Amino acid sequence: MAHGSETNQLTEPEFVAGNGLLHRRALLGRGIVFAGAVSTGLGAVTAAAAEPLSDAPWSLNVGTPIPAYQTPSRFEAHVVRTRDNPDNVPRNSRARTPHQMLKGIITPNGLHFTICHGGVPDIDPAQHRLVIHGLVRRPLVYTVEALDRYPMVSRIGFVECGGNSAPLFSNQPIQADVQALHGLTSCSEWTGVLLSTLLEETGIDPKAKWMIAEGADSPHLSRSVPVAKGLDDAMIAMYQNGERIQPGQGYPMRLWLPGYEGNMNVKYLRRIKLTEEPAMSYYESRTYSQILPNGKAYRFYFLQEVKSFISSPSPGLKLKEPGYYEITGVAYSGTGRIAKVMVSADGGKSWGEAALQAPILPKAFTRFRMPWRWNGGPAILQSRAWDEGGNAQPTRAQFVALRGETTKPPAVTDFPSQHFNAITSWAVDAKGDLRHVYA
Ligand SMILES: Nc1nc2c(c(=O)[nH]1)N[C@H]1C(S)=C(S)[C@@H](COP(=O)(O)O)O[C@H]1N2
Ligand SMILES: [Mo]
């Protein structure tokens, strides 16, 4: 890659929008000498000399034994979830995904966000049962072992808490990183039995319009789900990225409702009751309702709408020197596939189209990338997504006009409002530090 000193510059930079945004073609690696572009002095890439490489200590000894279940390098020990209730006082607890340190579309199992309203139950899979009853022809009880023999499917998709990004309802931009602001969404490959397979077997009384799903944890969290969703793409998920679902994700099984508000994805699932009417349970009538500026609330608000955020660069990740950077993040929509992501480096004055990394799957994270040459001056980075249903991620002004904002004290964890999906802005200053702004 090092072609000598005369190429210590971007060659033929092809700008698509203001403040250094490059055409996504640059990601193909042609027309840019990255070695020069990523290091002008401090040196991430330097000229290679011809003499033999010297040996570091780890090259001179036999390494450690291979562990039975491996965990990341000790040098990655900072890549962890942030927990808001480490002492497990009896209330809801959250652990947030460190998006600023992840680069793909799959959230590693140990880093998937978790919300438990009554701690993580220690469920013995041999004793766990799933009951499907109510307005069905034939009520049935399933063991984990039995479900393991049913036809399974694997699908990649996200789960997002309705309360994710709630700090952005504040009328002042709260100074926090992407993990604190957007860490309540994650994406996995889920494997399990489609609920439609089981409903086929129990039969459905035509009067049934709702299913009430209930968990086996101490709050017995329950939510009402339209039967239509149950017959569409709802899954009894038992595996997460190939292995048994984590305790934090609902071991031994959860309801996965692709694209629907996190809270409805009932973990530790023990019961599905088909009914004519919704249950109006605690979590659907109080905690997870969307209060509107006029004081009214949407009765039900299932969909997690089209959204994106830049994970890198983002607050806490300093730009050490001017030069080439990749702006990257995730986009997703509960409606379907992501159609387009636009990126701005000048606070929304001009936009360039980001590259979307395949696979682009419905109701899943899509990784976007945008090449950028930072000139060392101020910049405001934004991303905006569109889905295949033609829905555009709203600007902050559009969003606030419809849903309102709050003057409540700026605590990251405690905002009453749900389903924030507007644009996020990161400001870069001349020192290369990033902060959360409204633009
Ligand atoms: N049984 C049960 N299901 C639950 C919860 C819970 O506390 N108990 N939390 C809900 C909430 S509020 C969300 S956002 C999602 C989070 O899923 P995750 O913890 O797997 O990320 O699970 C939902 N399902
Ligand atoms: Mo949630």
Image (cartoon, rainbow, N blue to C red):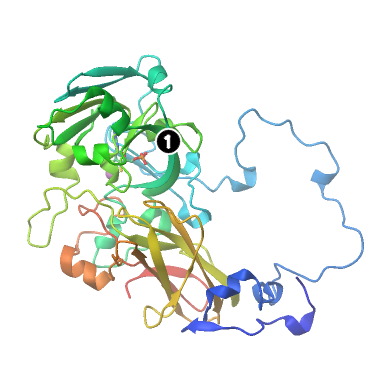
Residue at point 38%, 52% (across, down): 362
| Quarter that holds the N terminus | bottom right
Q: Nearer the viewer, residue 408 or 296?
A: 296
Tell me if residue 312 can be seen: no
Query: In this figure, which residue is indicated by the disc labeled 1?
Result: 153
Residue at point 19%, 63% (across, down): 407
Q: Nearer the viewer, residue 257 or 10?
A: 257
Tell me if residue 97 can be seen: yes
Quarter of the figure with residue 203: top left
Q: Nearer the viewer, residue 72 or 402?
A: 402
The percent coordinates of residue 256 (x first, y second) are 33, 38
Q: Name which residue type carries label 1.
A: Val
Q: How would you rate the neighbour count of disc 1 (Cα within 10 Å): few for under 14, some for 14-19, many for 20 or more?
A: few
Residue farthest right in this picture: 51
Residue at point 28%, 41% (across, down): 232
User: Is residue 319 left or right of 262 when viewed as pictured?
Assistant: right
The percent coordinates of residue 258 (x first, y second) are 33, 45
| Quarter that holds the C terminus | bottom left
The percent coordinates of residue 28 (x first, y second) are 62, 70
Give the answer, above or below, for where 308 lies relative to 319: above
Give the answer, above or below, for where 285 lies relative to 67: below
Give the answer, above or below, for where 304 lies relative to 140: below
Q: Nearer the viewer, residue 411 or 143?
A: 143
Give the structural element (helix, strand or loop) at label 1. strand
User: Is residue 281 left or right of 321 when viewed as pictured?
Assistant: left
User: Is residue 246 left or right of 32 when viewed as pictured?
Assistant: left
Query: Count the marks: how many?
Result: 1
